[in-house]
C-alpha cells in the first residue's frame, strides 16, 4: 500500500512557514503539491476548532480526506502543525509516536523562532527542516512502508 | 422575478407529511380517454389542472378541531389548529425512476450550472481581489438562496414518493370533480362513482400498499367560459345534491372574462411536479405559461378556499380521527399492554423469516402501525407518531424488512427534527445522527439483500441520497454546520453522476462557510473538489464559480501550489468560455506562483500566458487597451521595487561595506576641509536657529548634470527553473524640462531625439537566481527627471511586457506641510533628479597601490586626476590621509586653513575659533591633510595631473585609504552643483614585518648620556630577511643634540634579521655640542637619504599623541619622539621604517642636568639584600638582614628616618627605637635569631593579619641624625619572610629634614611635581628609590 507523509507548519498569523513532504513509499503516486496543500489547509480549520475543545497540544486526528489522515498539533503561541499521513501504520503505536514527533518538531520550531535574524513570517529554514526530518526518520519512518525519506 | 427562497428542512418535512388528497377531474379523465385537450388559446391561458387551484389554497388555518384518536386513552385529545392538505392529481400520485429524476434534476439546475453565457467576466476576475469577508458574505448568501441544489435533489426525492413504505404518501381522501355540462344529475352521480373507481385503481392502491379506505369530497365545476350558464350549473347542483351526493358543492373557474389576472395568484408556483415520463405524457403537462389562469377571478379562488376548508373540517379531519382511533385500538389490542408483550415474548417469534413484500400489504400489522404513525405525524401528534415508529421497527427488524425499517428510522428523525425546540440541541443531534445512521445501515443491508441488479442498486442509491441529504439539512437546521458535510461527502462517492457529486460537494462546502467562525480553508478545499466534478460534468459555469470561491481563501502568504492550481484551472475554464482577458489574468497569476513546478510545467505555463497575451492583443484593438494598466504585464521576473541604488557619473566604485560606516566617513571627510566651506550646503546659517526653518522637501531629490549617465541598480529575481530572457529592458522616466512640456516613455514609445535617453539592455537571468542589473539613463537638458520604474519584455513574441514601478522603502521620519508623514529617502535611493547644465567631470585613480604590503614599508604611488569632459575644472583640492600618504615632493605642503572641529558652528569657523576643544581628536577629519597646489587651479580636458605620493602603512591589519578630490566648474557655477567630489577608496592588507622595542638606561659617562637597547624581532610568519639600515632619534624642540655610537662588537657589519630571529643592538646616545648633528647612525648600505627623509617626515608628523599628552602632563617640557629604525629587505626591493614611540627612560631621564635643583631629590638610597632567601626547614618563617644605604645629595645636614609601615611590621616602640614584644613561652622560642638585639629574651611579634609574605622586624623605626652632605648612612634592618615566592621590598617610608633647631619635617609624596616643592613635606616611598623595585625571592 502506498504511503506518504507531509508536514505543514502555520504560524500564529496563519502564514505557512513550512510545507514539505517528508517521505513516501516506492509505489506512492506522486501527489500533486496543490492537493497536499489543500488537505493541509483544510485540516487547519479542524485543528483550530479542536484546539478550543482540548487543552492538550497534540490534537490527535483532526481530519480525514480519502486515505489521508491529518494529525494536528498546536503550540501555546498559536503555531499549528499538521502532519498528513497516507497509508497504514505498521503496528498500533502510532498515536504516541506521532505525538513524540510533534514534540520534536515543536522544539525545533521554538529554536527557529528564537532566531533574531528571521522575520516572523519567513520560512523556518534548513535547521528546522533537518531537525524535523531527523525526528521523522527516527520515529515515524519505521512505522510506515516508506521506501525513501527525503533527506 | 427572483426565485423563491428554498424551504428549510422542517418546513419540507412538515409539507411532505401532510395528508395526501387526490383530485380527480372529469375533464382530465376525458382527455385521457378520448384525447380531447385544450384549445390553442385555452392551453396557454386556462388553468391546466384543478390541482393547481387546490394547491394554491391547500393550507387551512384557524382551525380548532379537537381530535380523540387514542383508543386506549379516551381522555387524550389532539388539537389541530392548522392543516395543510397535499393535493395530487391522478398522474401526480406516481413514483419515478432514476432516469426521470436525473432528467428533471438536470433541467432544474440547467441555468445555474451549464449556462456559461450567464457568467459575468468582470465578476469572475473580481474574485482575484475579493476579500475574505466579502467572499464569506457572498457564499452565505448563495448557500441560502441558491435553488440548484434543492431543484436537483427534490427531483430525486419526488421520484421516491408514493412508494409502498411511506404511508404518509398514500392518499387518505379524494375530491371528485365533475364538470357542468348539459346532462342530468344522475349522470353526474355516475361520474362521481366512476371517479371513485379510478381513485381505487391508483398504483399505490393497486400494489396493496395503500389503504383504499378513504374519504371523498365532491364538487361540480362550472367553467364560466364553458358555454353553460351559471343558473344551469346551480340548478344541476341542486339536482345532484338531491340525487345522492348531498355534500357536493359548486366550484367556479374562469369567471373573469377580461382575463386580467384578477386572482393575483402565480399559478406556476403551485403547479404539480410530475416526475414519471409516462405520467407526463398522459397528462399532457408542459411548462407553465405566464398567461396560465388569467381568467381566474378572486371570487373563484375564495370559493375554492372555502370548499377546501369545508372538505378538511367536515370530511378529512373526521376521517383521520376515525382511522387513527381504529388503528390505535387495534394496536393496543394486539401489540401493547403486558399481555401482548408477554405474548410477543413467548408466542410470536422475533426470528421469523422475512416476509415477502407482497404479503406486507396495508392490512399487515406493521403497515397499520406505520400508517397510524404517519397520520399522527400529519395532525401534529409527534409523540404518538414516535411511539408508533419505534414500535414498528422491531417488527421490521425481525422480518429483515430493511427498506421499511430505514424509512421508519427516517420518520423518527423527522419527529426529532419537529420536536427540536423542546429538547437541548446536543440530544437532538445525537438522536438525529443515530436515526439517520441506522437508516443508512438498513439501506446498505437492503442493497445487499436485493441482488446485484442495476435497477435495485440505483434505487437504493436514490434512497441513500435522500436520506443523506435529509440528514445534512437536519444538522444544518439545528446549527451543526461543522458536521453537516459528512453525509453529503459520503454519498458523493456513490454513483457515477459527476453533476450529482459536484452538487453534493458544493453543498458540503457551503456547510463549512455557514459555521461560526467560517471554516474558509475547508470551504475552499471542498469547492475545489466540487469544481473538479463540475468540470467533468461539463458544467463550466458552475466549475468557474467554485474555483473562484476558493481563490480568496488562498490569498494569504504561502500556499503557492494551491494558488497556481486554482489560477491555472480558472484560466483554462475562462478560455473555454471565451473570456480571453480573464484567462490572461489568471494565467499571469499562475505563472507568479509556479516556482514549485518542474521546468517543463513552467514552460507550459509560460507558453499559455504568452499565447493568451498574444490572443488578447490581437482581439482587442489598441485604442481599447490601456497600456498604463499593465494588461499584458508579465509578472516575471520579480523585481525588488523597494531597493535601488543610484550611482552618478562622478561616483567611484568602492568595495566599502556597510560595516565601515563608509557614508558617514566620507561625509566627515568632505566637511572636514576638502570642500571649501563656502560651498557646503550647511554654510548658509551659523546654526540651525540662524538658518531659519528648514524647507520641507516633499520629494527628496538628487542632483545630476546634463549629458551624464545616471545608473540605477535594480535587483531582479527569476524564481523559475528556466532561464528568462529579458529584452528591451529600460528605465521608465518622466522628464519636466526647464522650458517645455512633460514627456515620458511610459506609453511604450521612446521618441527619437528625446531629451532623455534610457539605455536599452538585453539580459538573461539564470534559473532560480537573483541578479542586480545596472540600468542607465542620460538626460540631455536641464529640468526635473523622475525615474518611475522599469519595463521589459519576456519571451520571443514580445507580447509579454513586464512593468514595475519603484516604491523605495525609507522610514517615514518627517512631517509634511499638512502633518503627513514623509519618507526620508537616503541619497543613493532618490529617484527624482534636478538636472543641471553641463558640468566638468574629472576622474581620479591611484596607481601602484599594492593589494598587500609590509608593516612599515615605503612605496611610491601616483594619484592621477584627469578631466574627461570639455569644460574646464578649476581649483582642485585633494585630501590625503596623512597617516599613510605624503607627497614625494617635500615642497608640497598642506593648506594652513583652520581645521574643522566637531560641533563647531560656522561662526566659530569664521572667527577662527574651534568648538569642542583644541585637541586633534576633536577634528572632523583628524587624519586628513588638504593640498591645493597652485598648478591645480585649472585642469583642462586631456591634461591629467600625476601626483607622486609616498605610501607608508604603519600598523598591521587592513589599512584603508580614502582620498577625496574636490573641484569646481568655471564660474558662474550652477546653484545646485557648485562643486564636485571624487571619492577614492583603497584597502591594503598590511602584513607584519618585524617588531621593534627599545629601552634605555643612564650611562655613567655623562648625565645626559643613555644606553639604548634595541630589540628587533622578526614576525612569526615572516619569510623575508631584513637589513637594518639606520637608527635615528626623533626630532626635539630643544637644541641638545646627540651622537649615536653602537656598542656592538662589529659596528661595521650589517645587522640582519632572519626569519624567526630576534637581534639586539646597544647604542650609546651621547650629547654633543654640534648643533648640526644628525642624531643618526647608519649601518652599512644605508637606504637613500631621500627615502629616509620621507620616512622621517612620517615619523615626525605623527607624534604619538597619547604618549605626548601623558608626558607633557607629567614632565612639563620634556618631550620625546622615540626612535626610528629604517630597514630594507634582503633583496633591496623594499625599504621601510619602524617607529618606536615610547622609550620610557629615554624620555624620563633625558636631561637630568637641566632639571632645576629644587626639583631634584635630596636623598638617594639603595638597599643591599640577598636576592634569594632560603626558607628554613621545619619552620614557618625565616629571617634575613638587609642594609638600607641612604646618601645625602643636598648641600645641608639632614636627619634621615626609616619607618616601616604599621601594617607591614611588628608594632614598634617608638620611644626606645625598637619594637615592643611580649614574652611568649609557647612560640618562637626555639628559633634562632640573627637580628641584632640586646635583649636576651625571646620575643615574638604580635601576629599580623594573614596575607603578608614578609614583615619588617626588629627596630622598625631608625633615625640617622646630622647626615653630612654626600655622606652615606647605613640602616641595618631585618625582615621575616613567611611565604615562598617573589616579593618586593616595600612597606616603608624614608623621610628627611634639615638638622636645625626648629625641625620641620617635610614629606615628599608620590607625586614628583608636588614632592619637589620646598615647603612640602619630604617623605619618599619605596618606588622612589633609583633601583626600585627591589625584588627578592624566597625559596
Image (tube, coloured by chain):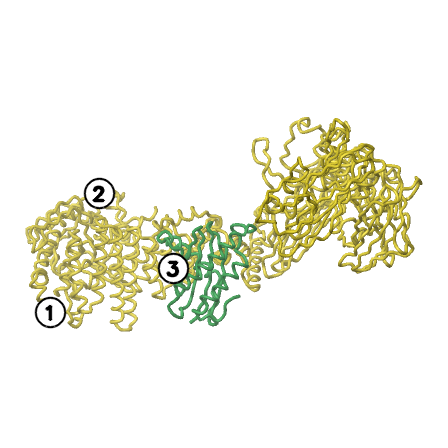
Chain colours: A green, B yellow
Element type at marker 3?
A: strand
Depth check, front residue: B819 or B632? B819
Measured in 3D between alpha carbons, the distance from the residue under mark 1 to the one under mark 3, in whole angstroms, is 49 Å
Q: Chain of mark 1?
A: B
Q: Residues within 10 Å of mark 3 (few under 14, many from 20)?
A: some
Element type at marker 2?
A: helix
Q: Chain of mark 3?
A: A
- The residue to which callout 3 is attached is A60
Depth check, front residue: B382 or A76? A76
Q: State the image quarter where residue B1306 is shown.
A: top right
Task: Mark 1 and mark 3 in contact? Answer it, CB < 8 Å.
Answer: no
Q: Residues within 10 Å of mark 1 (few under 14, many from 20)?
A: few
Numbered circle sitting on residue B298: 2
Q: Is residue B427 visible?
A: yes
- The residue to which callout 1 is attached is B348
Residue B1170, compared with residue A96, is above or below; it is above
Please give the name of the residue rendered at 78% of the width and 60% of the height, measured from the top-left corner.
B1060
Percent coordinates x, y for residue A70 in the rendering? 41, 61
Q: State the image quarter where residue B938 is shown.
A: top right
Depth check, front residue: B479 or B358? B479
Q: Is residue B975 visible?
A: no
Depth check, front residue: B741 or B564? B564
Tell me the quadrant of the picture where the C terminus of chain B can be found: bottom right
Measured in 3D between alpha carbons, the distance from the residue under mark 2 to the one under mark 3, in whole angstroms, is 65 Å
Task: Between label 1 and label 3, give the one nearer the viewer.
Answer: 3
Element type at marker 1?
A: loop
Percent coordinates x, y for residue B69 in the rendering? 10, 53
Amino acid at each position: 500500500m502506498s504511503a506518504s507523509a507531509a508536514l505543514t507548519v502555520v504560524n500564529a498569523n496563519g502564514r505557512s512557514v513550512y510545507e514539505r513532504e517528508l517521505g513516501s513509499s516506492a509505489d506512492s503516486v506522486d501527489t500533486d503539491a496543490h492537493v497536499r496543500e489543500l488537505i493541509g489547509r483544510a485540516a487547519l480549520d479542524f485543528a483550530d476548532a479542536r484546539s478550543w475543545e482540548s487543552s492538550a497540544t497534540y490534537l490527535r486526528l483532526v481530519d480525514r480526506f480519502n486515505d489521508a489522515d491529518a494529525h494536528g498539533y498546536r503550540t501555546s503561541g498559536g503555531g499549528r502543525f499538521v502532519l498528513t499521513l497516507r497509508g497504514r501504520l505498521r503496528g498500533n503505536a502510532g498515536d504516541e509516536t506521532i505525538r513524540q514527533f510533534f514534540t520534536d518538531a515543536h522544539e525545533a520550531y521554538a529554536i527557529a523562532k528564537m532566531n533574531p535574524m528571521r522575520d516572523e513570517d519567513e520560512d523556518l529554514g534548513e535547521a528546522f527542516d533537518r531537525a524535523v526530518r531527523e525526528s521523522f526518520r527516527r520515529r515515524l519512518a519505521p512505522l510506515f512502508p516508506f521506501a525513501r525519506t527525503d533527506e | 422575478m427572483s426565485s423563491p427562497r428554498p424551504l428549510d428542512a422542517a418546513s419540507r418535512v412538515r409539507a411532505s407529511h401532510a395528508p395526501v388528497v387526490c383530485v380527480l377531474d372529469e375533464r382530465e379523465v376525458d382527455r385521457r380517454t378520448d384525447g380531447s385537450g385544450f384549445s390553442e388559446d385555452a392551453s396557454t391561458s386556462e388553468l391546466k389542472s384543478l390541482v393547481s387551484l387546490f394547491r394554491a389554497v391547500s393550507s387551512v388555518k384557524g382551525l380548532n378541531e379537537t381530535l380523540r384518536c387514542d383508543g386506549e386513552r379516551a381522555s387524550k385529545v389532539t388539537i389541530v389548529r392548522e392543516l395543510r392538505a397535499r393535493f395530487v392529481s391522478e398522474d401526480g400520485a406516481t413514483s419515478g425512476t432514476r432516469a426521470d429524476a436525473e432528467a428533471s434534476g438536470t433541467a432544474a439546475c440547467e441555468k445555474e450550472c451549464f449556462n456559461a453565457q450567464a457568467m459575468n467576466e468582470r465578476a469572475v476576475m473580481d474574485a482575484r481581489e475579493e476579500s475574505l469577508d466579502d467572499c464569506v458574505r457572498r457564499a452565505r448568501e448563495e448557500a441560502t438562496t441558491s435553488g440548484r441544489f434543492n431543484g436537483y435533489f427534490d427531483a430525486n426525492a419526488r421520484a421516491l414518493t408514493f412508494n409502498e413504505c411511506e404511508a404518509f404518501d398514500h392518499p387518505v381522501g379524494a375530491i371528485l370533480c365533475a364538470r357542468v355540462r348539459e346532462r342530468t344529475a344522475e349522470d353526474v352521480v355516475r361520474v362521481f362513482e366512476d371517479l371513485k373507481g379510478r381513485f381505487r385503481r391508483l398504483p399505490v392502491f393497486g400494489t396493496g400498499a395503500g389503504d383504499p379506505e378513504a374519504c371523498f369530497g365532491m364538487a361540480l365545476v362550472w367553467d364560466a367560459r364553458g358555454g353553460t350558464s351559471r343558473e344551469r350549473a346551480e340548478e344541476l347542483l341542486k339536482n345532484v345534491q338531491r340525487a345522492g351526493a348531498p355534500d357536493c358543492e359548486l366550484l367556479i373557474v374562469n369567471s373573469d372574462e377580461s382575463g386580467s389576472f384578477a386572482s393575483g395568484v402565480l399559478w406556476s408556483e403551485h403547479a404539480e411536479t410530475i416526475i414519471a415520463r409516462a405520467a407526463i405524457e398522459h397528462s399532457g403537462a408542459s411548462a407553465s405559461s405566464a398567461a396560465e389562469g388569467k381568467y381566474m377571478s378572486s371570487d373563484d379562488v375564495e370559493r375554492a378556499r372555502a370548499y377546501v376548508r369545508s372538505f378538511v373540517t367536515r370530511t378529512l379531519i373526521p376521517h383521520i380521527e376515525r382511522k387513527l382511533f381504529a388503528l390505535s385500538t387495534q394496536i393496543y389490542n394486539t401489540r401493547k399492554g403486558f399481555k401482548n408483550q408477554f405474548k410477543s415474548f413467548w408466542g410470536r417469534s422475533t426470528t421469523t423469516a422475512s416476509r415477502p413484500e407482497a404479503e406486507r400489504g396495508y392490512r399487515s400489522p406493521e403497515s397499520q402501525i406505520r400508517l397510524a404513525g404517519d397520520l399522527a405525524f400529519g395532525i401534529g401528534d409527534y409523540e404518538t407518531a414516535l411511539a408508533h415508529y419505534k414500535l414498528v421497527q422491531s417488527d421490521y427488524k425481525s422480518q429483515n424488512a430493511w427498506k421499511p425499517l430505514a424509512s421508519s428510522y427516517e420518520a423518527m428523525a423527522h419527529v426529532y427534527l419537529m420536536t427540536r425546540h423542546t429538547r437541548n440541541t446536543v440530544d437532538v443531534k445525537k438522536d438525529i445522527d443515530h436515526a439517520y445512521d441506522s437508516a443508512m445501515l438498513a439501506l446498505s443491508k437492503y442493497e445487499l439483500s436485493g441482488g446485484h441488479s442495476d435497477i435495485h442498486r440505483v434505487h437504493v442509491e436514490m434512497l441513500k441520497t435522500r436520506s443523506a441529504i435529509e440528514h445534512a439539512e437536519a444538522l444544518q437546521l439545528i446549527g451543526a454546520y461543522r458536521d453537516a458535510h459528512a453525509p453529503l461527502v459520503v454519498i458523493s462517492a456513490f454513483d457515477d453522476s459527476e453533476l450529482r457529486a459536484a452538487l453534493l460537494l458544493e453543498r458540503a462546502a457551503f456547510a463549512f462557510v455557514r459555521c461560526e467562525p467560517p471554516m474558509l480553508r475547508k470551504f475552499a478545499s471542498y469547492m475545489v473538489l466540487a469544481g473538479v466534478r463540475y468540470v467533468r460534468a461539463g458544467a463550466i459555469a458552475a466549475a468557474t464559480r467554485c474555483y473562484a470561491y476558493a481563490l480568496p481563501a488562498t490569498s494569504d502568504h504561502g500556499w503557492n501550489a494551491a494558488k497556481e492550481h486554482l489560477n491555472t484551472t480558472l484560466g483554462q475554464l475562462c478560455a473555454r468560455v471565451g473570456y480571453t482577458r480573464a484567462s490572461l489574468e489568471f494565467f499571469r497569476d499562475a505563472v507568479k506562483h509556479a516556482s514549485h513546478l518542474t521546468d517543463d510545467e513552467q514552460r507550459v505555463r509560460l507558453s499559455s500566458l504568452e499565447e493568451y497575451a498574444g490572443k488578447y492583443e490581437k482581439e482587442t484593438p489598441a485604442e481599447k487597451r490601456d497600456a498604463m494598466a499593465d494588461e499584458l504585464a508579465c509578472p516575471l521576473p520579480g523585481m525588488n521595487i523597494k531597493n535601488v541604488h543610484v550611482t552618478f557619473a562622478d561616483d567611484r566604485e568602492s568595495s566599502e561595506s556597510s560595516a565601515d560606516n563608509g557614508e558617514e566617513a566620507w561625509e566627515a571627510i568632505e566637511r572636514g576641509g576638502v570642500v571649501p566651506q563656502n560651498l557646503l550646503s550647511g554654510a548658509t546659517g551659523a546654526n540651525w536657529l540662524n538658518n531659519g526653518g528648514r524647507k520641507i522637501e516633499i520629494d527628496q531629490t538628487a542632483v545630476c548634470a546634463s549629458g551624464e549617465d545616471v545608473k540605477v541598480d535594480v535587483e531582479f529575481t527569476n524564481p523559475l527553473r528556466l532561464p528568462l530572457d529579458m529584452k528591451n529592458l529600460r528605465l521608465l522616466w518622466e522628464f519636466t524640462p526647464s522650458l517645455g512640456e512633460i514627456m515620458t516613455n511610459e506609453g511604450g514609445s521612446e521618441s527619437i531625439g528625446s531629451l532623455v535617453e534610457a539605455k536599452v539592455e538585453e539580459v538573461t537571468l539564470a534559473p532560480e537566481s537573483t541578479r542586480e542589473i545596472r540600468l542607465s539613463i542620460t538626460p540631455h537638458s536641464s529640468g526635473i527627471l523622475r525615474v518611475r520604474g522599469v519595463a521589459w519584455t519576456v519571451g520571443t513574441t514580445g507580447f509579454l511586457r513586464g512593468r514595475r514601478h519603484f516604491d523605495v522603502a525609507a522610514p517615514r521620519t518627517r512631517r509634511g506641510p499638512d502633518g503627513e508623514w514623509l519618507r526620508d529617502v537616503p541619497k543613493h535611493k532618490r529617484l527624482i533628479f534636478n538636472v543641471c547644465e553641463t558640468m566638468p567631470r574629472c576622474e581620479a585613480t591611484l596607481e601602484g597601490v599594492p593589494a598587500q604590503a609590509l608593516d612599515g614599508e615605503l612605496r611610491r604611488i601616483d594619484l592621477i586626476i584627469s578631466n574627461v569632459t570639455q569644460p574646464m575644472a578649476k581649483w582642485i583640492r585633494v585630501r590625503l590621509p596623512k597617516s599613510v600618504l605624503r607627497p614625494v615632493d617635500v615642497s608640497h605642503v598642506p593648506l594652513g586653513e583652520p581645521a574643522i572641529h566637531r560641533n563647531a558652528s560656522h561662526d566659530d569657523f569664521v572667527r577662527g575659533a574651534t568648538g569642542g576643544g583644541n585637541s586633534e581628536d576633536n577634528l572632523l577629519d583628524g587624519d586628513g591633510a588638504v593640498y591645493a597646489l597652485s598648478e591645480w587651479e585649472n585642469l583642462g580636458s586631456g591634461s591629467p595631473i600625476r601626483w607622486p605620493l609616498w605610501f607608508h602603512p604603519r600598523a598591521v591589519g587592513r589599512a584603508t585609504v580614502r582620498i577625496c578630490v574636490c573641484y569646481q566648474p568655471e564660474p558662474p557655477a550652477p546653484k545646485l552643483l557648485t562643486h564636485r567630489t571624487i571619492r577614492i577608496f583603497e584597502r591594503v592588507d598590511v602584513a607584519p614585518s618585524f617588531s621593534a622595542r627599545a629601552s634605555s638606561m643612564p650611562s655613567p659617562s655623562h648625565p645626559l648620556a643613555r644606553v639604548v637597547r634595541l630589540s628587533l624581532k622578526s614576525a612569526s610568519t615572516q619569510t623575508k630577511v631584513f637589513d637594518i639600515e639606520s637608527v635615528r632619534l626623533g626630532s626635539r624642540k630643544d637644541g641638545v643634540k646627540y651622537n649615536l655610537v653602537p656598542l656592538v662588537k662589529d659596528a661595521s657589519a650589517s645587522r640582519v634579521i632572519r626569519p624567526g630571529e630576534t637581534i639586539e643592538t646597544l647604542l650609546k646616545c651621547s650629547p654633543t655640542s654640534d648643533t648640526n648633528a644628525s642624531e643618526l647612525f647608519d649601518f652599512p648600505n644605508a637606504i637613500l637619504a631621500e627615502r629616509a627623509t620621507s620616512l622621517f617626515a612620517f615619523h615626525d608628523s605623527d607624534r604619538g599623541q597619547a604618549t605626548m599628552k601623558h608626558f607633557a602632563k607629567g614632565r612639563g617640557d620634556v618631550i620625546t619622539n622615540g626612535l626610528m629604525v629604517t630597514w630594507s629587505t634582503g633583496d633591496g626591493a623594499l625599504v621601510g621604517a619602524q617607529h618606536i614611540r615610547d622609550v620610557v627612560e629615554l624620555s624620563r631621564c633625558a636631561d637630568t642636568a637641566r632639571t632645576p635643583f629644587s626639583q631634584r631629590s635630596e636623598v638617594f638610597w639603595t638597599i643591599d639584600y640577598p636576592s634569594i632567601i632560603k626558607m628554613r626547614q621545619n619552620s614557618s618563617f625565616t629571617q634575613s638582614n638587609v642594609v638600607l644605604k641612604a646618601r645625602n645629595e643636598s648641600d645641608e645636614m639632614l636627619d634621615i628616618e626609616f619607618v616601616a609601615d604599621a601594617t607591614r611590621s611588628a608594632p614598634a616602640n617608638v620611644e626606645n627605637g625598637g619594637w615592643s614584644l611580649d614574652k611568649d613561652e609557647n612560640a618562637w622560642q626555639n628559633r634562632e635569631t640573627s637580628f641584632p638585639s640586646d635583649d636576651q629574651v625571646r620575643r615574638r611579634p604580635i601576629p599580623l593579619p594573614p596575607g603578608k609574605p614578609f614583615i619588617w622586624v626588629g627596630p622598625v623605626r631608625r633615625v640617622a641624625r646630622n647626615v653630612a652632605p654626600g655622606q652615606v648612612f647605613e640602616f641595618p634592618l631585618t625582615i621575616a619572610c613567611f611565604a615562598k615566592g617573589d616579593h618586593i621590598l616595600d612597606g616603608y617610608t624614608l623621610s628627611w629634614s634639615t638638622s636645625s633647631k626648629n625641625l620641620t619635617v617635610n614629606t615628599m609624596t608620590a607625586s614628583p611635581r608636588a614632592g619637589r616643592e620646598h615647603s612640602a613635606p619630604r617623605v619618599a616611598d619605596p618606588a622612589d628609590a633609583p633601583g626600585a623595585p627591589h625584588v627578592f625571592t624566597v625559596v
